[in-house]
Image (tube, coloured by chain):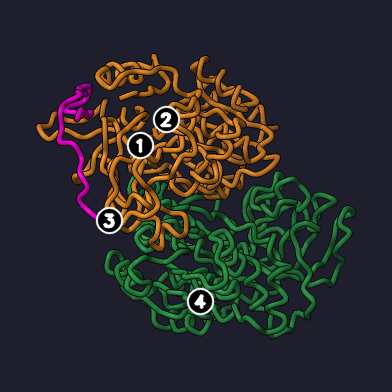
Chain colours: A green, B orange
């Protein structure tokens, strides 16, 4: 089968790899019908040192079950299902608490003999725990929306939930990428009254307004912070959702948050330290968030997609075939595309 | 009157200063009947550069009201009252939310023309908001316990509350100073089932056991972390209360906390960065806490002292007269004394 391999920064190829097979009784094999490129795929795209042992890419996909192992009972061939961006047994102590990102048997796609999601098929470890069946056909127009359950919608939901966004709240969202826009959706779903989106790509921030942002702040750094304070009676936002991961963004988050407020960061941190000294300690700032346990919220969020009340799939603004994957990465990296859909 | 001034690291003196007077209608003047030395007083004691403009010391005290300004209505001369370690109007938006540490008109004792607490008297800004009346006489045996409402008991309570310590919880407390021991009391009050106290001064950890610690870990660093993990089924503690403020302690806190758990730090941070990179982000660790709004919890905690169910005043293991203050600082700094009571 064909799959996406990354050999170095900027060097993404589609190549022939072995077709996946059942290895363990709890495995399934799916034929992938829709996948996409993630903002986090761009970190190695910018920085991966050249390697002869290329990385298997992709961790967001919808597939049709082709085969199941003898220990899989909740799925059968022909089922359409979405995979969260980490696989998990969904039965261990962490999973039962909704922290599937710390599953004792879980892991990442594309490493340790597990397929990536940007290919034609994938072996699914702990298929009963990992996959969630979709009650639509593979020709459904909702497929792009449902694909966001793999990652960005659940990640935005995780940001808003861990920040404790509640009815009437004031929220600032840092970053107008797909996760930032999904965080706007999630903040609105939780009843936030004021949602300030910090981003400077007008097409994206316009989509953010459609999703529920009440204001857009295009300025960055201290200027951006000053604008957020202006918009919040001088105090700052009670909840800040940091959806970028760069140090500048976390500094901006501390600047924009109200005393006693909470920053939830869901952008993968690109530095090992957080600037969080006595000044923000005195202000009683809480820093929460982390890698979203997407599996935990798929069932909760799916109905809102099925009934049309949210349309998170609007973050996809380009569709490519698998063979054009290199162009998809390039377009996202150059910010020509917000998020690229792949039809294998 | 006599008051405590710090001229340099290791140089604490008692000198004559002007007797406080009412300056604003909302002021009161109290005669101090009991005060103490705080662990945080030891930071300047270790590091203050020599100055001709000495720092007025002390921020925990109980006093008898001698005079009130025309705008003070809740207190009258003769009332015995405890002062939290920050003064506050107790009416602004932050105060009404219980965040008196961010009071718009509040501030610290000992700076900007406000007296310190280690003296014979003090002017109290926003006396109605700041002071809390005590329903005992100044000869009460409970006075040392009630003095902990100024800071350490409320700070321990803040640690446990912001960490979300709940019935049945597993808690690790880092630090066997007065705040660490008060955090043990607070964790127990909230129903924690397992309270692991990390400290290596046996007299102090023995007191911690009396206060409710179920285990003591004397080891530090990676060894201490391994012991906490042993005691928690390999997972770590769900809540970690960091009561030191040094970088090693926060590193230890991240090591000791369970995936999905919360660290609350109430030890004043002595560094500007927190080592909190992708690894702990992936584990969904929350970092909360901060400077305690002591004023917010005095009324809630006082009844537990008055009915004898907690005895936080046991952290005081030495009593000195004001003129002996230098010796009190030395004894605490050399760890001969846990916490020193001052009878002016």
Which element is circle 3 on?
Answer: loop
Question: Which secondary structure, mark 1?
Answer: strand
Mark 2 and mark 1: span between their CA atoms?
A: 8 Å
Residue drawn at x 58%, y 31% as measured from the top left:
B310
Q: Residues within 10 Å of mark 3 (few under 14, many from 20)?
A: few
Q: Cβ–Cβ below 8 Å for labels 4 and 3?
A: no
Q: Are marks 1 and 4 in contact (CB under 8 Å)?
A: no
> Residue B138 — which label?
2
Instruction: Tell me whether circle 2 and circle 1 mark residues in contact (CB < 8 Å).
Output: yes
Check disc 2 and report its element: helix, strand or loop: loop
- The chain containing the residue under callout 4 comes to A
| Residue B150 x, y percent position in the rendering | 41, 38
In space, the residues marked 3 and 2 are separated at their CA atoms by 25 Å
Q: Which chain is mark 3 on?
A: B
Q: Considering only vertical position in the picture, is B61 above or below B296?
A: above
Q: Which residue is mark 3?
A: B70
Furthest toward the left, the residue is: B52
* Separation (CA) of disc 1 from disc 3: 18 Å
Pointer 2 chain = B
Q: Provide residue A162's location: percent of width, then percent of height.
A: 57, 58
Which numbered disc covers residue A193? 4
- Residue B64's disc is 1
For label 2, the crowd category at 10 Å Cα-Cα, with few meaning under 14, some 14 to 19 and many 20 or more, is: some
As for residue B6 lying within the magenta part, the answer is yes
Residue at (56, 60) in percent of width and height:
A5
Q: Quadrant of the C terminus of chain B?
A: top left
Q: Which residues are magenta?
A: B1-25
Q: Are marks 1 and 4 on the same chain?
A: no
Instruction: Name the N-terminal-most of marks 3 and 2.
Output: 3
Say if mark 2 contacts mark 4, CB within 8 Å.
no
């Amino acid at each position: 089968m064909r799959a996406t391999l990354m050999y170095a920064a900027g060097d993404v190829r589609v190549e022939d790899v072995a077709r996946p097979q059942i290895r363990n009784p709890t495995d399934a094999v799916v034929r992938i019908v829709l996948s996409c490129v993630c903002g986090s795929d761009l970190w190695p795209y910018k920085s991966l040192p050249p390697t002869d042992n290329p990385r298997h890419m992709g961790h967001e996909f919808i597939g049709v079950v082709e085969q199941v192992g003898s220990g899989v009972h909740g799925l059968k061939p022909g089922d359409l299902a979405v995979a969260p961006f980490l696989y998990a047994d969904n039965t261990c102590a962490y999973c039962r608490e909704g922290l599937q990102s710390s599953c004792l048997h879980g892991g990442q796609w594309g490493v340790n003999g597990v397929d990536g999601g940007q290919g034609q098929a994938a072996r699914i470890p702990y298929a009963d725990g990992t996959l969630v069946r979709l009650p639509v056909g593979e020709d459904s127009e909702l497929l792009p929306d449902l694909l966001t359950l793999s990652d960005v919608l659940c990640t935005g939901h995780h940001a808003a939930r861990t920040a404790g966004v509640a009815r009437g709240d004031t929220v600032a969202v840092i970053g107008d990428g797909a996760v930032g826009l999904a965080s706007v959706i999630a903040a609105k779903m939780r009843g936030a009254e004021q949602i300030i989106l910090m981003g400077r790509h007008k097409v994206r921030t316009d989509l953010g307004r459609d999703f529920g942002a009440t204001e857009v702040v295009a300025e960055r750094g201290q200027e951006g912070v000053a604008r957020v304070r202006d918009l919040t009676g001088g105090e700052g936002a009670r909840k800040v959702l940091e959806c970028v991961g760069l140090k500048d963004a976390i500094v901006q988050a501390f600047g924009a948050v109200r005393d006693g407020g909470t920053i939830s960061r869901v952008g993968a941190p690109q530095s090992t330290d957080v600037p969080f000294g006595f000044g923000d300690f005195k202000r009683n700032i809480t820093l929460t968030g982390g890698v979203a346990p997407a599996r935990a919220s798929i069932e909760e969020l799916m109905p809102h997609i099925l009934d049309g009340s949210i349309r998170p799939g609007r973050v996809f603004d380009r569709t490519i075939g698998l063979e054009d994957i290199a162009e998809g990465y390039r377009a996202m990296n150059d910010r020509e595309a917000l998020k690229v859909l792949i039809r294998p």
